[in-house]
Amino acid sequence: MDLKDKVAVVTGGSRGIGRAICIELGRLGAKVVVNYAGNVAAAQETARLVRETGAPEPVIMGFDVRDAAAVDRAFDEVKKLGLHVLVNNAGISKDGLLLRFKDEDWHQTLATNLFGAFACSRAGAKLMTKQRWGRIINISSVVGESGNAGQVAYAAAKAGMIGMTKTLAKELASRSITVNAVTPGFVETDMTAGLNDAQRKMILEEVPLGVAGSGADVANAVGFLATDRARYITGHVLSVNGGMYI
Ligand code: NAP
């Protein structure tokens, strides 16, 4: 119960990797705030699974990470609980080759993955700074490290998250707030459900371990970074990618 008496906010906690992170942080004893954008039923299912771990009663909070005012209002509510761990996990992927890529898809991808993580970090760090302890964990992607044809906006956003991670690690260290990034490789979730068998096979050929990752694989890394076992690790990018990018 390394996170007993700690409060953890997970953006995009309703589905996929975010749900697995909520469950793992709950298993570690945290009171989990499950954020979602539109899918309240999925957030409720996450909360049910968190409860099953024996964690304190989870809180469900709907807000759009692209909307700074909504983020600030949500963190005003979080303030009443206290905040120790923030996982910036909410993300979308709009894919397409450069020459046909639409401005709107660029803006939406950057707004959700990068601005969302910035807005939540700003609001969350205010609360953590006062208590002089905190963990910010940004869910970036292997694609932010390696690049990927057809993912110009997503790769830029995820690479941006790595730059932001290293900068905030330096800014917030004096308050004992660590800031790290986790870069998952290929994980089977709704985000990757649109891939056909041929695309899936092609991706797995790039994975030395030969299998897709699970949400739990990512959540285990996040859980480690959230606890005091990782107290001397900051500004780090932890790959959870089966060797896809080394
Ligand atoms: P997913 O299954 O599509 O789930 C996305 C989550 O983000 C949902 O909970 C969704 O909420 C939430 N979300 C989307 N837009 C939001 C917004 N504007 N405000 C608040 N929440 C929002 O995705 P996933 O595969 O679990 O991915 C989670 C993270 O891991 C993302 O940052 C993704 O880029 C990263 N990642 C994924 C993979 C992979 O292979 N799957 C690989 C590397 C990195 P609703 O349920 O309400 O829609």
Image (spheres, rainbow, N blue to C red):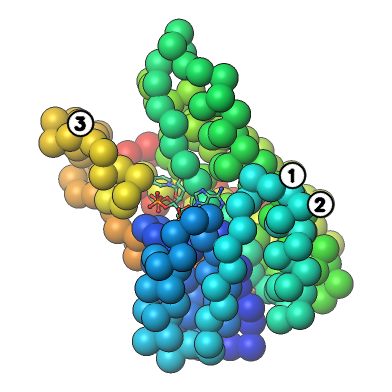
Q: Which residue is nearer to you in this view: 87 or 208?
A: 87
Relative to 208, does residue 171 appear above or below in the rendering? Answer: below
Answer whether labels 2 and 1 touch (C-beta < 8 Å).
yes
Q: Residues within 10 Å of mark 2 (few under 14, many from 20)?
A: few
Quarter of the image holding residue 203? Answer: top left
Which label lies toward us, 2 or 3? Answer: 3
Q: Residues within 10 Å of mark 1 (few under 14, many from 20)?
A: few
Q: Determine if residue 59 is in view.
A: yes
Helix, strand or loop at mark 2: helix
Q: Does the residue tagged 1 have its C-beta within 8 Å of any atom of ligand 1?
A: no
Give the image location of residue 94, x and y in percent: 44, 31
Helix, strand or loop at mark 3: helix
| Residue drawn 49% across the image and 75% down it | 25
Q: Which residue is nearer to you in this view: 65 or 28?
A: 65
Look at mark 2 in the image and give the residue it sits on.
171
Give the image location of residue 45, x and y in percent: 38, 73
Give the image location of residue 77, x and y in percent: 73, 73
3D distance between C-alphas at marks 2 and 1: 6 Å
The C terminus: image quadrant: top left
Residue 167's disc is 1
Look at mark 3 in the image and give the residue it sits on.
199
Q: Is residue 131 left or right of residue 78?
A: right
Earlier along the polypeptide chain: callout 2 or callout 3?
A: 2
| Residue drawn 49% across the image and 30% down it | 155
Q: Give the amino acid at mark 3.
A: Gln
| Residue drawn 62% across the image and 38% down it | 111
Q: Is residue 11 left or right of residue 127?
A: left
Residue 216's disc is none
3D distance between C-alphas at marks 1 and 3: 35 Å
Helix, strand or loop at mark 1: helix
Quarter of the image holding residue 60? Answer: bottom right
Q: Determine if residue 227 is in view.
A: no
